[in-house]
């Protein structure tokens, strides 16, 4: 729940506050409404908390965040499993 | 020296370690609190204390939202979950946390419909799919998750959903830090500021710590090097006699925070007059509740919650651990009666709790400490 997970925006969805995002190979809808002033586009990296993008980050930071998360181990696996079950509309 | 886990850039870490040691004044001891559970996790995982001179110690703070929920609040949540036609939804982190009468998992085993969700928006979907049920979201977390809950309530309102509510347990980090600063048994020289919470609130809210309490604070990232670099920045400030708020994690944390996130929190929620924190007691203006304008999404208004208060188990010293007064291994039940499999206290439940982090990764160091104490 506390883990910020990096993801790459794949496409913007019809609802303007949603985007399809690739998170460690899992593609899910993520809410980008909290970044409405940041002009999020496909190819951008975002840091995701509980289904919401909280900040835009660069690719280096995304790689660093992923390295951290892989070190976290079980909690990260649990979070990815939960994300895989997620079905945000 | 033996490291729990090697990490990349170990050479840079050694260099920082040397620079920190060079800044230590002879005879002076330095205590820094890392407020955030994510930092605690990194520190134990990578054995960062082994990179620090003996005169620098790290104290674990209250920044694990699962850990600070008082048992009575969980009993209230279970009370709601066990009402007719209710589906309770919760982040996985909360499922094993023991209340006075068991956990969400225990209640689920007895027949309550309690489901794990990744996002509050998943709860909203469950509500849409189950119009004849009352779907409640167990909202927990600091300012990192509060905007998500608020956005979800706004969405429920916009969609005209009638069967969705939140049981709001969101807490705010600043009053907790203030309570620790005001605590008579605490002597700290500075703070590592939380990373993700600061993404939302920015760095300005910490300025009172520098101004009124003469302590430096550095907002820190989550990698081992981030933490060592932030400790270095704190040491430089102390050497120069400065007390300022600095941002080491500029890659993610904007100085002003996320204004949209702050605005939606403020739209949906307001400060409670006071809220009980596990281990810290009642702290005024330290938690959020749903504003009256959104009362129909407030589980506390919909269900007559009993407002249960439960004293922490006598053997459990989570309170002292959360305030940084004792280290996890100094608790009487640590690793014996209280383990991640059978937790007594909240700090052992969450992987970001100081006790669980220490239990999982701290063995080498703990044995080292024991040997040192014996000698």
Image (spheres, coloured by chain):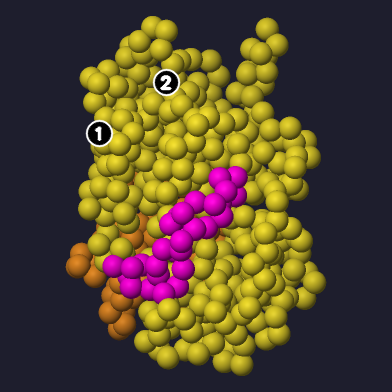
- Palette colour of chain A: orange
Which residue occupies 62% across, 55% down? B70
- Which quadrant of the view contains residue B115? bottom right
Query: Which residue does the numbered mark 2 point to in the structure image?
Result: B30
Chain letter matching colour yellow = B
User: Is B264 a magenta residue?
Assistant: yes
Q: Is residue B265 left or right of residue A78?
A: left
Which residue occupies 40% across, 57% down? B143
Which residue occupies 57% across, 31% down? B325
Q: Position of residue B149 (x, y in %)?
A: 44, 70
Under tag 1, what secondary structure?
A: loop
Mark 2–mark 1 contact, CB under 8 Å? no
Q: Chain of mark 2?
A: B
Residues B283 and A44: in front is B283
Q: Residues within 10 Å of mark 1 (few under 14, many from 20)?
A: many
Q: Is residue B367 above or below residue B121?
A: above
Residues B221 and B208: in front is B208
Choose the circle earlier in sequence order: 2 or 1. Answer: 2
Query: Which residue does the numbered mark 1 point to in the structure image?
Result: B244
Q: Position of residue B15 (x, y in %)?
A: 34, 18
Q: Which residues are magenta?
A: B263-291
Under tag 2, what secondary structure?
A: strand
Q: Chain of mark 1?
A: B
Q: Residues within 10 Å of mark 2 (few under 14, many from 20)?
A: some
Distance, label 2 to label 1, CA atoms, is: 17 Å
């Amino acid at each position: 729940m506390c883990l910020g997970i990096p993801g790459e925006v794949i496409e913007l969805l019809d609802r303007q506050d949603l985007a399809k995002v690739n998170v460690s190979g899992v593609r899910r809808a993520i809410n980008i409404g909290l970044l409405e002033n940041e002009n999020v586009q496909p190819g951008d990296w975002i840091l995701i908390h509980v289904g919401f993008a909280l900040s835009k980050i660069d690719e280096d930071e995304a790689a660093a965040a992923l390295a951290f998360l892989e070190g976290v181990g079980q909690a990260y696996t649990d979070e990815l499993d939960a994300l895989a079950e997620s079905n945000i509309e | 020296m033996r490291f729990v886990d090697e990490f990349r850039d170990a050479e840079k870490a050694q260099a920082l370690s040397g620079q920190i040691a060079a800044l230590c004044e002879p005879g002076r001891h330095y205590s820094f609190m890392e407020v955030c559970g994510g930092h605690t996790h990194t520190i134990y995982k990578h054995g960062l204390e082994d990179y620090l001179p003996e005169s620098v110690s790290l104290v674990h703070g209250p920044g694990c939202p699962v850990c600070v929920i008082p048992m009575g609040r969980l009993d209230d949540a279970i009370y709601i979950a066990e009402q007719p036609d209710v589906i309770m939804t919760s982040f996985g982190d909360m499922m094993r946390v023991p209340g006075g009468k068991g956990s969400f998992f225990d209640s689920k085993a007895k027949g309550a419909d309690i489901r794990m969700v990744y996002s509050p928006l998943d709860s909203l979907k469950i509500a849409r799919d189950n119009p004849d049920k009352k779907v409640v979201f167990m909202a927990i977390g600091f300012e990192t998750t509060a905007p998500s809950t608020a956005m979800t309530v706004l969405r429920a309102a916009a969609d005209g959903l009638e069967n969705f509510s939140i049981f709001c347990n969101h807490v705010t980090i600043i009053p907790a830090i203030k309570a620790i600063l005001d605590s008579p048994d605490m002597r700290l020289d500075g703070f590592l500021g939380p990373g993700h919470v600061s993404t939302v609130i920015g760095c300005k809210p910490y300025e009172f710590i520098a101004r009124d309490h003469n302590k430096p604070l550095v907002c820190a990232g989550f990698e081992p090097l981030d933490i060592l670099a932030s400790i270095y920045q704190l040491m430089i400030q102390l050497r120069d006699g400065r007390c300022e708020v600095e941002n080491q994690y500029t890659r993610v944390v904007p100085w002003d925070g996320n204004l949209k996130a702050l605005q939606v929190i403020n739209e949906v929620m307001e400060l409670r007059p006071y809220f009980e924190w596990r281990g810290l007691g009642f702290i005024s203006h330290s938690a959020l509740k749903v504003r009256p304008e959104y009362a129909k999404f407030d589980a506390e208004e919909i269900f007559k919650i009993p407002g249960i208060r439960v004293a922490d188990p006598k053997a459990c010293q989570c309170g002292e651990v959360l305030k940084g007064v004792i280290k996890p291994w100094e608790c009487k039940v640590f690793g014996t009666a209280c383990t991640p499999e059978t937790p007594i206290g909240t700090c052992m439940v969450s992987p970001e709790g100081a006790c669980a982090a220490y239990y999982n990764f701290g063995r080498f160091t703990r044995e080292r400490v024991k040997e040192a104490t014996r000698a």
